[in-house]
Image: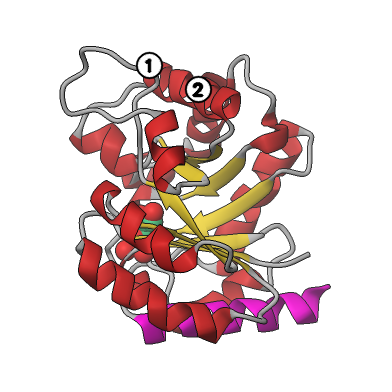
Amino acid sequence: MRPFIAGNWKMNHTPSSGKKFAEELVPRIKSLGADIVIFPPFVAIPSLYEVTKGTSLKIGAQDFYWEEKGAFTGEISAEMLKEAGAEYAIIGHSERRNIFGESDELVNLKLKTAVDSGLKPVLCIGEKLAERESGRTKDKIKFQLDAGLSGVSTEKVIIAYEPIWAIGTGKTATPQQAEEIHCFISEYLDERVKILYGGSVKPANAYQLMTQSHIDGVLVGGASLKIDSFYDIIRNGIKAFEEKN
Ligand code: 13P
């Protein structure tokens, strides 16, 4: 198995700075044994695709709307993203849920659309600090999996476990904390789905996290914005996988 290493750029990088990043990254990762995906802002997808087409660097979207087309001002469809070069899509990131009020029902509709349209979905789930501290982490995970995946075949879905208290805070879950929840998710789904960890992943902790047997890769925010730190995370992931395989 190869590690799956993804960078969620959130609202960072423009079409030109994103393209420059991809131009530098493509030759560096050319013969590495990892699946590598960048999730840039929508407007940067075409310029990144221009330089990554046919290479091992894949592109994804951070979100989309589930309807095919119509009067949905400000929204973008799965088909539009695919034509622009996106192969993957993040669904239900905690920032979408908490800042923009996305419900589990909406997350589920988006998952169904992604699977139907052939966009590979990365479903984000994770607990808040108060839920962890009151011992409700697994209940929350179970709830989000049931609601998000209702009526969806999990075969094509990638799960990203992103504890909210670890996102952008510099407080990473320990490898043991992450492994416990990854193990729980994989037992709960009763299938070997790919499960990524996200939340303050850095070059310094990527190796330890990815040596855990149920951590299949990482979804990186802040540390994916600079080429050197993202590249170091990729190399550390590959090293961890070589050792655990
Ligand atoms: P950070 O790596 O900046 O904590 O962000 C994680 C994340 O939200 C990835 O989707």
Q: Is residue 75 visible?
A: yes
Whole-percent x, y for residue 169 in the image: 27, 64
Q: Secondary structure at mark 2?
A: helix
Residue 121, magenta (yes or no):
no
Q: Is residue 148 visible?
A: no
Residue at image location 28% in from the left, 37% down from the top: 96
Name the residue that disc number 2 marks.
113
Whole-percent x, y for residue 97 in the image: 30, 33
Quadrant containing ligand 1: bottom left
Residue 229, magenta (yes or no):
yes
Question: Magenta span: helix, strand or loop, mainly?
Answer: helix
Q: At label 1, which amino acid type do we have?
A: Glu
Say if 117 sits above or below 201 in the image: above
Whole-percent x, y for residue 44 in the image: 28, 56
Magenta residues (range): 227-245
Q: Nearer the viewer, residue 210 or 23?
A: 23
Name the residue that disc number 1 marks.
67
Q: Nearer the viewer, residue 67 or 47?
A: 47
